[in-house]
Amino acid sequence: YHVFMILFLVAMMHLPLFFVSWSWRLESLLIGFYVGVLLLEDFLWFVLNPYYGIKSFRRGKIWWHKHWWGPVPSFYWILIIIAVVLIYFGRTVIK
């Protein structure tokens, strides 16, 4: 399941390549968007899951997220930084 979903999402993120030529800037933008989607998907899994919900999205309630920085797991901050940097470098693709 996870392998299929990862491959499917990567393929969907690269659909613009059927309409424009490939470049490193476009690839940076697409990967940055993909990382942002992964982050959003992980957060929404907890929020929309009836077993957890937004009230249970905190340290101690989610056992597999061991390290938290503030209100979210630490890797959320890392993914945000990666997504912002990649999108920043790909920002000039769309004009």
Image (spheres, rainbow, N blue to C red):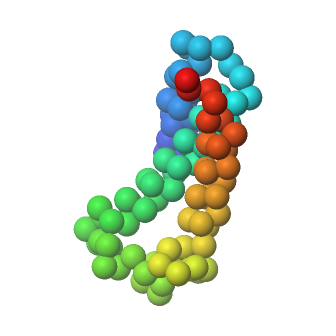
Residue 59 sits above or below residue 85 on the image: below
Image quadrant where residue 33 sits:
top right
Residue at 51% across / 37% down in the picture?
Answer: 9
Image quadrant where residue 57 sits:
bottom left
Residue nearest the observer in this picture, 2 or 23: 23
The answer to whether one can see residue 91 in this image is yes
Numbered disc total: 0
Work out which residue is located at the far left of the displayed protein and give it: 50
Work out which residue is located at the far front of the displayed protein and give it: 95
Q: Using residue 3 as the reference point, say whether residue 53 is left or right of it.
A: left
Residue 62 sits above or below residue 1 on the image: below
Residue at 30% across / 71% down in the picture?
Answer: 53
Residue nearest the observer in this picture, 95 or 3: 95
Residue at 64% across / 63% down in the picture?
Answer: 78
Residue at 50% across / 29% down in the picture?
Answer: 12
Residue 21 percent location from the top left of the image: 65, 14
Residue 33 sits above or below residue 11 on the image: below
Residue 90 percent location from the top left of the image: 65, 35
Work out which residue is located at the far right of the displayed protein and give it: 24
Image quadrant where residue 87 sits:
top right
Residue nearest the observer in this picture, 93 or 34: 93
Name the image quarter holding the C terminus: top right
Q: Using residue 25 as the reference point, say whether residue 10 is left or right of it.
A: left
Residue 61 percent location from the top left of the image: 42, 83
Residue 24 sits above or below residue 58 on the image: above
Work out which residue is located at the far bottom of the displayed protein and give it: 60
The answer to whether one can see residue 4 in this image is no
